[in-house]
Amino acid sequence: MKLRIVYDNEAKEGLESDWGFACLLEAEKSILFDTGASAEILSRNMQRLELKKEDIEIIALSHEHWDHIGGLDAVLHQNVAVYVPSSFTRGTKKRIEEKAAEVVEVSGPADIVPGVHTTGELRAGAGIKEQSLVLDTKECEGVVVLTGCAHPGLENILEAAKGFGELYGVIGGFHGFDNLKSLETLKMIIPCHCTVHKEEIRRRYSEKAVWCGAGVVIEI
Ligand SMILES: [Zn+2]
Ligand SMILES: [Zn+2]
């Protein structure tokens, strides 16, 4: 499966960086995970990567913060199904329904397409509910977890993802996660977006932690 980062706080030359996150998965279907903060920036980055919104078959939104759903208008179209945590507000669901084929509400763990699963909406304390994706690697070495902001806590998300297989790697926003030692057993660590301890993670796990930014392509 190929993953392309299309929106991130950092970017490769020729692409725009901005606070937010979006990643396109080339799985059995073309799946966009999150949409960044700005529809204009998402459109421009997609154009430069020669990606068309009509080719996106599924959009999965991690949580209802502006830096993950703000770019929706750039990618919604009549034939796309949008997977959202069922806790999304009625207003946002309605806004999506008007421009998409279907809104699929996610509660518990589920399969989206073969090889792509969702943890279901998770929540820590009174925090915001968030879903993360769990991806099977091609050679079946385990699963790679794709997070938005990791508001439920990265450790809780990784624990939930174990239900789909042995943990191989993690990609995305880790937020304030600081139990770096717990990542030791992973083979791929790609801290993106809001990860506070990005530099430290890359230094500590230099052999398996890759730089993240818009334009980066990851094969799993
Ligand atoms: Zn957030
Ligand atoms: Zn975020």
Image: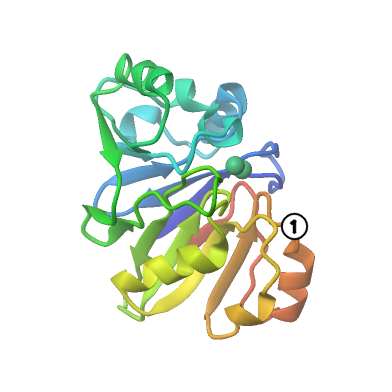
Q: Residue at x 37, y 61 (%)?
A: 134
Instruction: Give the colouring mode of the picture.
Output: rainbow
Q: Residue at x 42, y 25 (%)?
A: 89
Q: Position of residue 27 (x, y in %)?
A: 30, 54
Residue 166, quarter of the rendered image: bottom left
Q: Residue furthest front?
A: 125
From the image, which quarter does the N terminus lie in? bottom left
- Who is closer to the viewer here, 19 or 45? 19
Residue 209, quarter of the rendered image: bottom right
Q: Residue furthest top?
A: 98
Number of marks in the image?
1
Q: Quadrant of ligand 1?
A: top right
Q: Position of residue 9 (x, y in %)?
A: 70, 44
Q: Amino acid at mark 1?
A: Val
Check mark 1 vs ligand 2: CB closer than 8 Å? yes or no: no
87 displayed left or right of 125: left
197 displayed left or right of 100: right
Q: Give the vertical position of 58 relative to 113 (above or below).
A: above
Circle 1 is placed at which residue position? Answer: 196
